[in-house]
Image (cartoon, rainbow, N blue to C red):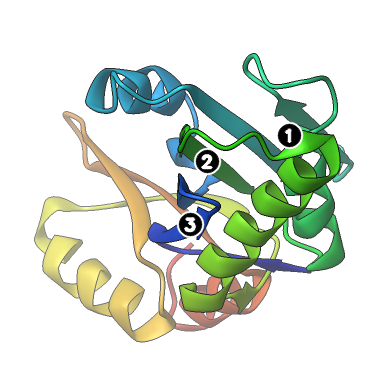
Amino acid sequence: MKTVLSSYSAETVVNRSKFLSFLVSYAEFDGLQKKLKKEHPKANHVVYALRYLNEFEQIVEQSTDDGEPKGCAGVPALNVLRGEELVNVAVFIVRYFGGIKLGTGGMARAYAQAVKDVLGVANLVPYEKQVKYMFETSYSDVDKTLYQLKQAGITQYERDFGVDGVQWSVAGSQEQVDALVKTGIK
């Protein structure tokens, strides 16, 4: 399985219709369709497809045609994500109608091509399950802990500064968390 760590975009033109594709991590999904509709008020449709892993490590899929004929937009986009074995990603396609009807088959091919084009510019990375780890340090060890996090390759962390010390909550691959624990953090 693969995923993305940042956002990517591409443009595809089919028979004068313009398709703007946006590939994002699943964490960025909420509210993005509404934002894209606001940014592109003259666009006819904002279609999306997504795949993510739930808390039971099951793949959840969803897509929408946003007014296009049923099954002609979201499903072809989702099929491309399936074919690339992508997880924890969402793809949005903004369509500007160019005046030439594509037909249902042509529309399905155009949406699939729009997703393929954005995948062509994306940096796909192997998916690694994220493990959460919590620990506590003193205030004097904050800089040392930040250094140890960097050495372990952990970039996702939250700190809660309490009365007695600092509560840390970090997320990374099992390998990264193991490397952090080997530094003596408990």
Residue at x 85% of width, y 45% of height: 57
Q: Nearer the viewer, residue 142 or 111?
A: 111
Q: Nearer the viewer, residue 74 or 137?
A: 74
Q: Which residue is labeled 2 in the image? A: 93
Residue at x 45% of width, y 38% of height: 98
So how many labels did they put on this image? Answer: 3
- Whether tag 2 and tag 3 are in contact, CB under 8 A, the answer is no
Residue 140 picture quarter? bottom left
Of circles 1 and 3, which is in front?
Answer: 3
Of circles 2 and 3, which is in front?
Answer: 3
Q: Which residue is labeled 3 in the image? A: 13
Q: Position of residue 152 (x, y in %)?
A: 42, 81
Mark 1: which amino acid?
Answer: Gly
Q: Position of residue 126 (x, y in %)?
A: 67, 77
Q: Residues within 10 Å of mark 1 (few under 14, many from 20)?
A: many
Residue at x 55% of width, y 52% of height: 15
Rendered image: mark on residue 10: none
